[in-house]
Amino acid sequence: MSRKLAWAALAVAVAGLFVALRSEFTVPENFPVLDAAEIGSNTPAAGGTELATFGSGCFWCTEAVFQQLKGVTKVVSGYSGGSEKNPTYEQVCSGRTGHAEVIQVTFDPAVVSYPELLEVFWRSHDPTTRNRQGNDVGPQYRSVVFTHSDRQGQVAELYKQKIDAAQVFPRPLVTEIEPFTAFYPAEGYHQNYFADNPRQPYCRAIIGPKVEKLKAVFANKLKPDAP
């Protein structure tokens, strides 16, 4: 099994470490948002949806966060940014494929805007640590935005600059922003992972507390039936 699962089991066995991990993630406060002039015009087609692709460490965590949001109709965990076609989880975990663990989000821009998704993305992980999120280390865990249009790229770059200018984080953002090329869905057991495995050690130690903190911050953005 993966290093994540092995580490999670150890975290549960060591009570002191377990407590420390539960309090590790802090949602940044006083976060800037883009105003209408910065966002520009973007009139979504009636009934149309868009795609967004984000990498922010373990995709189990990222998926669990974005599944909660109003306007998000689908979230798929997978791999993007590398050269290997149809990679396996084990290959990506080696750090040699160039792929990042990502989620691909299908969303209704009439309900939730792309800048709002970016806000959730940047506030739900540490975008200042290169190739690392907590105990997950390697290029597969890098902070990255894969853009699906020129507009997404422009908005993401502008927002990144605004966050740095506001000095929200103690260090500059290292989030990579690059055009989307390909997405490979992860194996079936990775999909809907937190919802299907809430008692799994990694879920209890890491994902659950993180999701609860984010739900408190983004209460007005959550689906009415969000667990």
Image: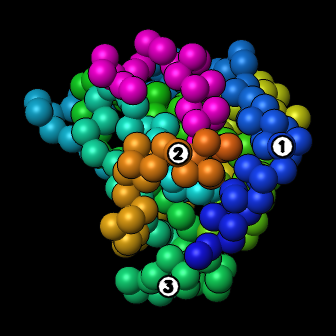
Where is residue 111 shown, x and y percent of the image? Answer: 28, 23
Q: Quadrant of the C terminus?
A: top left
Q: Position of residue 155 (x, y in %)?
A: 50, 39
Q: Which residue is mark 3?
A: 83
Of the image marks 2 and 3, the number of the one nearer the N terminus: 3
How busy is the neighbourhood of tag 1: few (under 14 within 10 Å), some, or many (20 plus)? Answer: few
Q: Which is nearer the eye, 200 or 98? A: 200
Secondary structure of the residue carrying tag 1 is helix
Provide residue 43's location: percent of width, then percent of height. Answer: 24, 28
Marks 2,3: beta carbons within 8 A? no
SS at badge 3: loop
**Label 2, label 3: how far apart the Cα atoms are:** 35 Å
The residue type indicated by label 3 comes to Ser
- Is 68 positioned to the left or the right of 34 in the image? left
The magenta span reads 207-227
Q: Which mark is residue 15?
A: 1
The residue located at (62%, 52%) in the rendering is 202
Find disc 2 in the rendering and name its residue.
199
Which tag is nearer the camera, tag 1 or tag 3?
1
Q: Is 110 drawn above or below residue 3 in the view shown? A: above
* Image-quadrant location for residue 188: bottom left
